[in-house]
Image: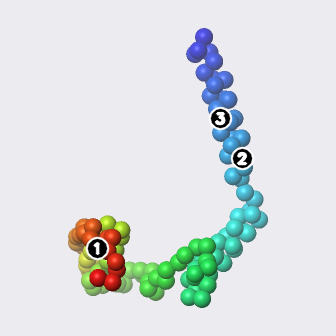
Amino acid sequence: MLASSLPELHDDHAQKVDNYLHQFNLSDKTLMDLSVRFRREMDKGLCRDTNPTATVKMLPTFVRSTPDGTEQGEFLALDLGGSNFRVLLVKVKGNGEQKVEMESQIYDIPELVMRGSGSE
């Protein structure tokens, strides 16, 4: 008896999911409007004068361009998170080798530093 009602149960669940998700269907016009508004808020978040009142807080990046394959040398990446400090050394070989080597180390941030006053 239960086996014969499974297709109906599946169809019923699928219909409920479709009905729920229907409200998330957005027109192209609405998506474009959201995109413009989001971009405007990101610009506000990047500007020194409007950052305090921006709904999207942004931090400036110091990345000036994307890699083009001609890069070579050693690059250091530092990531200071909430509980870890990650250090990554990336060695990029030139001369058409296009070889990349990476070394990394993760350091725990002590609780006293994490919850300290900041002035120390």
Q: Quadrant of residue 20?
A: top right
Q: Quadrant of residue 47?
A: bottom right
Image coords of residue 118 (percent x, y):
34, 80
Depth order, front residue of 110/15: 110
Q: Which residue is mark 2?
A: 22
Q: Amino acid at mark 2?
A: His
Identity of the residue drawn at 59% across and 14% down: 2
Identity of the residue drawn at 27% across and 85% down: 73
Q: Name which of mark 2 and mark 3 comes first in the sequence.
A: 3
Depth order, front residue of 113/18: 113
Label 1: how many residues lie within 10 Å, few (<14), some (14-19) or many (20+)? few
Q: Which residue is mark 1?
A: 113
The Cα–Cα distance between marks 2 and 3, rounded to whole angstroms, is: 12 Å
Tell whether label 1 touches label 3 (CB within 8 Å).
no
Element under disc 1: helix
Q: Amino acid at mark 1?
A: Val
Q: Is residue 83 above or below residue 65?
A: above
Element under disc 2: helix
Q: Which residue is mark 3?
A: 14
Tell whether label 2 touches label 1 (CB within 8 Å).
no
Label 2: how many residues lie within 10 Å, few (<14), some (14-19) or many (20+)? few
41 horizontally vs 67: left or right: right
Q: Quadrant of residue 36?
A: bottom right
Depth order, front residue of 75/60: 60
Name the residue furthest front.
117
